Amino acid sequence: MHPSLRPFLSLCLLCCLASSSCLSGAAPPKALVAPIVYDTSTSLYAVSPLGGPPFDRALLLNLDSSNLWKDCMDPLISLSTLQAVLYGSAICNSASVQTSLITGDPGYVSGCTGLPTPICSNNSCSVFVSGSSSSSPNGVLWTGTISLLSTDGAHSGPLVSVPMFAFACSDDILLNAQGALPSNAVGAAGLSRAALALPTQLARKLSIQRRFAYCLPRSSIPGNGILFFGRSPYVFPPAGDISNHLRYTPLVFNPQEADSYFVGVKYVSVNKVQLPINSTLLQLTNNPSIIINGEPAVVGGTSISSTIRYTQLESSIYDALAREFTAAATGMGLSPVGAEGVFETCFDASAAQTSGSGYAVPEITLTFQGGQGASWTFTSSNSVAVVGDGKHICLAFQRLDKFQIRSIVLGTYQQQDALLVFDIANSMLGFVPDLAGLGSHCSNFPFSTSH
Ligand SMILES: *[C@@H]1O[C@H](CO)[C@@H](O)[C@H](O)[C@H]1NC(C)=O
Ligand SMILES: *[C@@H]1O[C@H](CO)[C@@H](O)[C@H](O)[C@H]1NC(C)=O
C-alpha cells in the first residue's frame, strides 16, 4: 500500500465504524427508498415493509406520526429480537411529540404483571402513537433492525440495515379502528419532524441529509409510488432527473405543532383570477378564545397531509373557490348539477371537453409565500373527480364546515403524481406539481426486482 493512502483509509474506517451503515466494504448510502402503495379501500397510502420480522408488514405513510409504530401483539413479537429503551435514556428523552393530534413527553412504564410483553415492560419508555384518526394510545419504545433499499436516485440498490432503530410497539387498537390504516398495514411510518420519526432518525444513524421526498402514485394507474430519504437525484423515466423542475417555498414553523408541516399560501386563483379570501385565514395567527396547553391556539394557515384524501378548505375559502370555479366552468359550457356523494360542487360530464389525460376544467392555482412566489397549478386529474359512473365531474375539494383550526389542509388527491421534497434541514418544501406534464408518473421509478 502506498503510505500516503493510510490516513485516508484509517479515517474512512473510523467513519465506517462510527456509522451504523458499516456494510462490508460498501460506501455508505446517501439515500434510501421504499415503495408506496395506494389502498383503494381506505384511500390511504402504505409504505412497503422495512425489512424482515418484525418489520415485514406494510405501514401507513403518515406525515403526522412522530415515530415508527406497529402492532407487536398479533402476532406476538419475540422480545429476543428487540432491545428495551429504558425511561430516562437518551432515546427516551428525545421522544417528545407535538402534532395536532398529540402533544406530550414520554412516560414511564410500570406495574406490568407477569412476564414483560412488547407493550408492557417495567422501567421502559412509553410514547404516543397515532394513526390517521385522533386516537392516540400509548406504545412502548424498543429498538430493532429495520432495512431500506439504497438508491442512487435512478434505481434501487442493495438493502441497508439500520440497527438500533427506535420504534414503538402498540397493541392492535388502531388496527381495529375502521379506516385508520390501509388494509394489510400494521402500524405507521412516521415522517414528522420529531427526533424519532424516520427522516431524523435515519439522518442521524446513516449520516444522510435530513430530508425526505415522496411521490404518491395516481390511484387510477397501477404501480408503486416512492418514498426517498436523504439527498439524491429524482429520476423518473422517461423524464430523467426532475430535480431541476423543483420549485421551493419555505416550510412554516408552528410552535404548537412543531412536528407537522405547514406552508404559506399567499393566494388561490382560478384561471388566474385571484379569489377574494380573508388573508388572515391564510396565516398562522393566535386565537385567544381557544386555549391549547395554556396558550392561545395557533389557527389558520395551510398544512400538508398524507392521510386526508381531498383538500379541505375553511368554509369561506371553499365558497370563494366554488363560486369562481363554477363561473369559469359554466363559461366553458359545463352545467352545474349540485352535490354528488362527498362533493358539493359538480357538473354534468357529457358536455365536458377532454384535454391531455383528463377533462378540460378551470385551472386552480396555489401561489406560495417566499421570494420566488412558487405556484402549484393542479392538473384536472388533481382538481376534479369523476363520479356517478362517469356522469359527473366534481370539484375535488371539501368544506371544513364546523370550526377547524386549519384553513387549508392539502390532501393526497391533489398530491397524486406530484413530487414533494420535505427538506427539514433547510426548512423548505420543494415540489414538482405534475410528473405527467413531464411525460412521467410517480409509478415510473424503476424499483429493481432482484432485492
Ligand atoms: C413490574 O413492576 C410491578 C410493580 O410495579 C411488579 O409487581 C412486577 O412484578 C414487575 N414485573 C416484572 C416482570 O418485574
Ligand atoms: C378575517 O378573519 C379574521 C379571523 O377569522 C377575522 O377576525 C377578521 O374580522 C376577518 N376580516 C374580514 C375583513 O372579514
Image: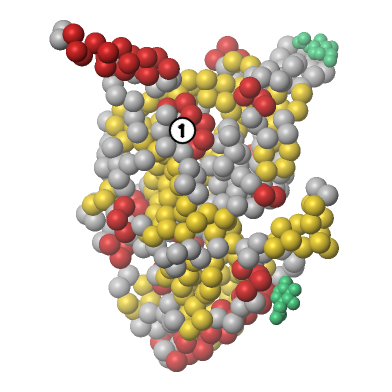
**Which of 57/236 is in front?**
236
**Which of 278/355 is in front?**
278
**Outermost residue to the left:** 2
**Which of 440/173 is in front?**
440
Residue 8 seen in this snapshot: yes
- Element under disc 1: helix
**Residue 391 vertical position relative to residue 100 in the rendered view, above or below:** below
In the image, residue 223 lies at what x, y percent? 35, 49
Residue at the disc numbered 1: 203
The residue lying at 23 percent from left, 52 percent from top is: 240
The residue lying at 81 percent from left, 61 percent from top is: 288
**Which of 18/365 is in front?**
18
Query: Image quadrant of residue 21?
Result: top left
**Residue 278 vertical position relative to residue 448 in the rendered view, above or below:** below
In the image, residue 335 lies at what x, y percent? 49, 89
The residue lying at 30 percent from left, 73 percent from top is: 356
In the image, residue 203 lies at what x, y percent? 46, 33
- Residue type, numbered disc 1: Ala
Question: Is 430 positioned to the left or the right of 96 in the image?
Answer: left
In the image, residue 13 lies at what x, y percent? 33, 14
The residue lying at 60 percent from left, 42 percent from top is: 65
Point out the quarter of the image occupied by ligand 2.
bottom right
Query: Image quadrant of residue 430?
Result: bottom left
